[in-house]
Image: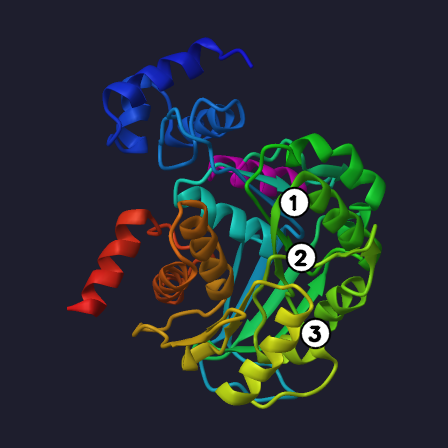
């Protein structure tokens, strides 16, 4: 695709000064940082850059990732005193871009990965703002579906004084517009992708269709359940055959409750029991099972072995988005060629950075920040 004059000028600056900050690039172009981010998103979409990290194409294969699922506006209310049920509580309110798939896509972009987002929003002001902010973060939003007659999704979370989640409400009926037909229309977006992340917000039929497409195209899929009820959809889909071949993702990333839902029975948060549950998924063809356990860390399981990883020390301000950061950093590392165990460590570093921020996606997240956090733990 042809570049505009401004895009060409920006690309030249990036080639000349690849370590320049967005502010410096904006100053030299005589524009704003937000405008630079929009142009970077266009350069990523056109293949002139490999991601928000200003990575220029090389002669090797481009590790492009597609993320499919929910994008919405996050509304976070936090009490300023110990929460009391059944009555009003004093607190604060923050509104920001959110949604599991959108958050994962932004985390990937911040880590220098070329990423496209397939999602759905309404034709309303919330949708306009959400698309603008996501594009400014370096994500290709061209495949996002605009839906008439449906409001853009919202996710309202109520947090306690300590930042822990008390209750949440997701109003995301617009995601139902991602039908098998809508996904089929976006088949070309999938071509050439090395990885695909899909969250549990898709319907069972849409999930089955997407797994069919990725199987045909040879794309490795990571399934993020989102919640226990939504995780059940994968269990139903994995019983489906495609010309004698089961529809299964390459990896799943559940917490303990979501793993229980995937298996259809309750599991205790015990490494032996969790390993046994993971082995059941391996027997169905899943290669990686990464079980997130909150403050207890995580378990990474393959058909051959299991590793326990501790959560990294962090001063918690807000846990919202930590799981999305874990998944984004995990996949960024896999897409960069790192082994799964090292990728999981990157995920924990990203989670630690995120819970220390009041933002759902930490503005401080970068490859350098991850390495600094990992180095600080290893010394």
Q: Residue at x 37, y 21 (%)?
A: 31
| Residue 258 lies in quadrant | bottom right
Label 2 secondary element: strand
The residue identified by callout 1 is: 126
Question: Is residue 113 visible in this depiction of the protein?
Answer: yes
- Image x and y of residue 189, in percent: 65, 33
Q: Quadrant of the N terminus?
A: top right
Tell me the magenta residue range: 126-139
Q: Residues at badges 1 and 2 in contact (C-beta under 8 Å)? A: yes
Q: How many marks?
A: 3
Q: What number is the disc on residue 275? A: none
Residues at marks 2 and 3, CA–CA distance in whole angstroms: 26 Å
State the SS at label 3: helix
Q: Is residue 134 shown in magenta?
A: yes
x then y, percent, for residue 335: 45, 46
User: Does residue 90 lie above or below 184 as drawn?
Assistant: below
Q: Residue at x 80, y 57 (%)?
A: 203
Circles 1 and 3 in contact, beta carbons < 8 Å: no
Our reading of the magenta stretch's main secondary structure is: helix
Instruction: Look at the image and tell me in which quarter the C terminus lies.
Output: bottom left
Quick check: 19 left or right of 40?
left
Residue for point 33% across, 17% down: 29
Please say if the residues under marks 2 and 3 sit with CB atoms less than 8 Å apart. no
| Residue corresponding to mark 3 | 262
Instruction: State whether residue 147 appears in this view.
Output: no
Q: Which residue bears the numbered disc 2?
A: 154
Q: Badge 1, how many Cα within 10 Å: few under 14, some, many 20+?
A: some
Q: Residue at x 37, y 50 (%)?
A: 363
């Amino acid at each position: 695709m042809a570049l505009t004059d401004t895009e060409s000028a920006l690309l030249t600056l990036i080639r000349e000064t690849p370590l320049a900050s967005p502010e410096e690039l904006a100053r030299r172009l005589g524009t704003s940082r937000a405008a630079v981010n929009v142009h970077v998103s266009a350069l990523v979409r056109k293949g002139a850059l490999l991601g928000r990290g200003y990575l220029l194409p090389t002669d090797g294969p481009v590790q492009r990732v597609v993320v499919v699922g929910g994008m919405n506006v996050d509304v976070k209310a936090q009490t300023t005193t110990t929460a009391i049920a059944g009555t009003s509580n004093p607190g604060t309110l923050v509104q920001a871009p959110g949604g599991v798939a959108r958050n994962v896509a932004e985390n990937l972009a911040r880590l220098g990965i070329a990423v496209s987002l397939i999602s759905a929003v309404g034709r309303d002001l919330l949708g306009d703002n959400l698309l603008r902010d996501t594009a400014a973060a370096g994500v290709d939003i061209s495949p996002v579906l605009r839906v008439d007659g449906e409001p853009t999704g919202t996710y309202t979370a109520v947090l306690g004084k300590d930042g822990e989640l008390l209750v949440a409400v997701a109003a995301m009926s617009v995601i139902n517009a991602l039908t098998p037909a809508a996904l089929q229309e976006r088949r070309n977006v999938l071509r050439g992708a090395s990885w695909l992340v899909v969250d549990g917000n898709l319907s069972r039929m849409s999930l089955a269709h997407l797994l069919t497409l990725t199987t045909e195209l040879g794309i490795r899929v990571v399934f993020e359940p989102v919640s226990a009820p939504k995780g059940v959809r994968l269990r139903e889909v994995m019983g489906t055959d495609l010309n004698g071949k089961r529809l299964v993702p390459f990896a799943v990333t559940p917490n303990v409750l979501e793993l229980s839902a995937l298996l259809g029975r309750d599991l205790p948060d015990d490494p032996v029991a969790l390993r046994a549950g993971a082995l059941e998924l391996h027997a169905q063809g899943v290669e990686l099972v990464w079980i997130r356990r909150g403050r207890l860390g995580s378990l990474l399981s393959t058909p051959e072995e299991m590793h326990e990883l501790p959560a990294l020390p962090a001063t918690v301000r807000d846990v919202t988005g930590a799981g999305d950061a874990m998944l984004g950093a995990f996949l960024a590392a896999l897409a960069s060629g790192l082994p799964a165990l090292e990728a999981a460590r990157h995920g924990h570093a990203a989670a630690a950075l995120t819970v220390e921020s009041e933002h759902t996606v930490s503005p401080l997240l970068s490859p350098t920040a991850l390495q600094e956090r990992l180095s600080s733990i290893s010394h």
